[in-house]
Image: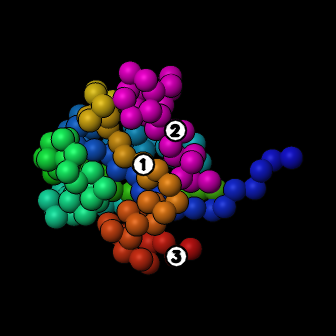
Amino acid sequence: MKEELPLERTLFIVKPDAVERNLIGKILAHVEDRGFRIVEARLGPIAREEAERFYAEHRGKPFFLDLLDYMTSGPVMLTCLEREGAVRGLREVVGATDPKEAAPGTVRQLFGLSKQMNSVHASDSPASASREVELFFGAQALAR
């Protein structure tokens, strides 16, 4: 019997390195082909203050400032995606943080350049997904 998964929304970001390499369409097609529906999307820069709030859990870590510099270095494609079991499912589709360790056929294995420039972000838990979607799209984006 197939497990019933809840309909969820999650944040997916095509990062500056992938936007610069004109990969938005390929990456979003890859994700849509796996059953995800784009609920909201916005192309543009992330303000430094937004990046600081988004990555607040990493404040004080050695890579924090480099991460902020990278994520604000150019436009990103912010998307709110929906699917049954979206959070866990998207994590499987994007693969491990380090493209060298990502499974074959995952977004990061196909398009990632390095652990930081791994082309995409995907929320890591339902709680993070709610916080991240609300940060970039507002509470109305969480309503179904």
Q: Residue at x 63, y 62 (%)?
A: 7
- Picture layout, residue 141 above or below residue 75: below
Q: Which residues are magenta?
A: 85-109
The image position of residue 93, as x and y in percent, is 52, 38
For label 3, the SS is loop
> Which numbered tag is attached to residue 93?
2
Q: Are marks 2 and 3 in contact (CB under 8 Å)?
A: no
Query: How busy is the neighbourhood of tag 1: few (under 14 within 10 Å), some, or many (20 plus)?
Result: many
- From the viewer's perspective, is residue 143 above or below residue 128? below
Badge number at residue 143: 3
Q: Is residue 130 visible?
A: yes
- Pointer 2: residues within 10 angstroms few (<14), some, or many (20+)? some
In this rendering, is residue 20 above or below 110?
Answer: below
Residue at figure coordinates x 28%, y 44% from the top left: 15
Please tell me whether mark 1 sits on a helix, a strand or a loop. strand
The C terminus sits in image quarter: bottom right
At label 2, the amino acid type is Val
Q: Is residue 67 visible?
A: no
Say how many tags the image has: 3
| CB within 8 Å, label 1 to label 3 | no
Disc on res. 91: none
Instruction: Let me know if residue 99 is in the magenta part.
Output: yes
Tell me the tag on residue 122: 1
Which coloring applies here?
rainbow
Horizontal side of residue 57 vs 68, given as left or right: right
Disc with the residue nearer the chain's start (2 vs 3)? 2
In-front residue for pair 1/22: 1
